Image: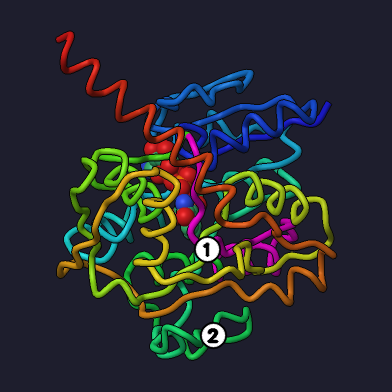
Amino acid sequence: MKKALVCGAGGFIGGHLVNRLKSEGYWVRGVDIKTNEYGNNRADEFYRGDLRQPEVVRAVVTDDLDEIYQLAADMGGAGFVFTGDNDADILHNSVLCNLNVLEEARKKGVKRIFYSSSACMYPEYNQLDPDNPKCSENSAYPAAPDSEYGWEKLFSERLYLAYQKNYGLEVRIARFHNIFGPEGTWDGGREKAPAAVCRKVAMAEDGGFIEIWGDGLQTRSFLFVDECIEGIRRLMQSDFSGPVNIGSEEMIAINDFARMVIELSGKKVFIRNIPGPVGVRGRNSDNRLIRDKLGWAPTLPLQTGVAKTYIWITRQVQEKIQEHVTA
Ligand code: NAD
């Protein structure tokens, strides 16, 4: 039986990954500073601890592990990452987690380690045209991410690759592009655009309106979490280190994304565009490398994933309202 450690198991993607590894027959240890709020906690062992602390990392990174998946990061959506208010924490906290986990993996002789980077590391100058962004893996340099979150991801990619080069650790790096789905953060300030839009529409009254940050013409692609997990597993089983994009190529303007959710809701809801943190003008995954190296790329239509997510978030909203009523 293979043994894996999932760092960030209390989070959205980490929780889904734990479940997937369990269904594949792995023995799984999870670690996070918080437990998973939505019940994605099938790990055989869950350690509640802070990966910034070396003693915690010493306890969870053991020499019997076959694989480590490092997804822990101080992160959130545009309202957390692009305001500038959290930059020091984002850089300090996530770098510390990566430094500690990698060094302990080296000491304990763990063979293979996965690192979750982000499309936020791509240079802003290639993402100014909403209709024609460039995010091929080899376009990363000269580096110019538009956020400290992106700089941290870029630095940490280099850190992992240096450990591979100098210490022989087998490293696998993916650059995620906007992952969404059920059991993810949907309120509280760290939620990302897809969940925020679903929540706003779920809470809107028929004939009401929702607010969308920016002019709504900024473009993105969104990847359903199941396909992200599939990509992680395929990359981990391959002999390709990456970095490689794991994302969807179905690019959409944010206002059109909101219209998609509104249509699924069956309500008549209007969009009001307001100033807010938005990030780059355009971003889309470029899947040529993943197709070439893994013989696979995501295919699920955006609308299918959005429908599942909208249903789940609507239920969360209703449960929260119920709690308030009965409290
Ligand atoms: P998430 O916030 O749900 O999960 C991250 C988890 O890390 C959280 O549960 C958090 O508590 C934990 N964590 C943070 N600091 C920690 C610490 N010091 N010690 C222990 N645990 C700590 O986010 P997610 O969406 O599941 O993202 C997982 C990874 O994928 C992150 O590295 C993120 O940067 C990356 N990523 C995500 C997306 C996306 O769209 N969701 C896009 C690009 C990259």
Q: Magenta stretch: give its range.
A: 158-182
Residue 302 is situated, as x and y percent measured from the top left of the image, at 57, 57
Judge: label 1 CB < 8 Å from ligand 1: yes
Query: Who is closer to the viewer here, 269 or 188?
Result: 269
- In the displayed structure, does residue 112 sit left or right of residue 228? right
Distance between the alpha carbons at the discs numbered 2 and 1: 13 Å
Residue plotted at (71% across, 59% down): 299
Q: Tell me the tag on residue 134.
A: 2
Which secondary structure lies at badge 1?
loop
Q: Foreground residue, 141 or 256?
A: 256
Q: Answer with left or right where residue 58 lies relative to residue 292.
A: left
Callout 2 crowding tier (Cα within 10 Å): few <14, some 14–19, many ≥20: many
**Residue 259 place in picture, x, y as percent:** 38, 59
Q: Quadrant of residue 23?
A: top right
The mark that comes first in sequence, 2 or 1, is 2
Residue at the spot 48% in from the left edge and 71% down from the top edge: 154
Q: Residues within 10 Å of mark 1 (few under 14, many from 20)?
A: many
Which residue in the protein does label 1 denote? 177
Label 2 amino acid?
Answer: Lys
Q: Residue at x 41, y 57 (%)?
A: 95
- Picture quarter with the N terminus: top right
* Residue drawn 44% across the image and 70% down it: 120
